[in-house]
Image (cartoon, rainbow, N blue to C red):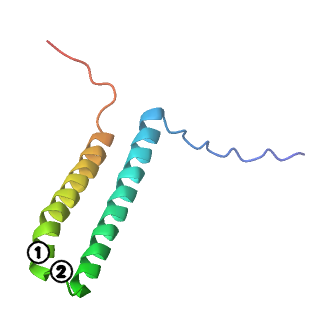
Amino acid sequence: MTKKPIPRPKKPTPDTRDKLTLYVTLMVSTTLCISVLAMVISFMLGLWAKEVDNAEIFKMISPAFSTLIGGMIGFLSGIKLMQNDDKSKTCKD
């Protein structure tokens, strides 16, 4: 008597939209990390530079820092909220 192999469930293959969402999310996250690191490094270097006034560094970096982080987080949350949107919506009159 031969034993039948136990059928294993097949892994679901992600569709193109899921792949694209993942790719864009990873790219935005990577860009956010690199940008924030660059801003923090420039901020730290400016703090110890003798010819640069620390108040001027805060004036220059604060708006850019807030705008960059706010925009990227908004973009990421928008992508994640739209990811679970119903794919088969139909327009009803």
Q: Farthest residue in the right direction?
A: 1
> Does 21 sit above or below residue 59?
above
Which residue is label 2 attached to? 52
What residue type is disc 2 on?
A: Val
- Quarter where residue 93 is shown: top left
Q: Quadrant of the N terminus?
A: top right
Q: Residue at x 25, y 54 (%)?
A: 72
Please, which residue is most extreme toward the front here? 51
Label 2–label 1 contact, CB within 8 A: yes
Q: Amino acid at mark 1?
A: Glu
Where is residue 47? Give x, y as percent.
22, 84
Mark seen at residue 56: 1
In front of the other: 72 or 48: 48
Taking depth in this image into account, of 35 and 5 the one nearest to the observer is: 35
Spot occupied by residue 43 in the image (x, y as percentages of width and height): 24, 76
Residue plotted at (32% across, 62% down): 35
82 relative to 26 in the view: left or right: left
Q: Secondary structure at mark 2?
A: loop
- Give the percent coordinates (x, y) of residue 70: 18, 57
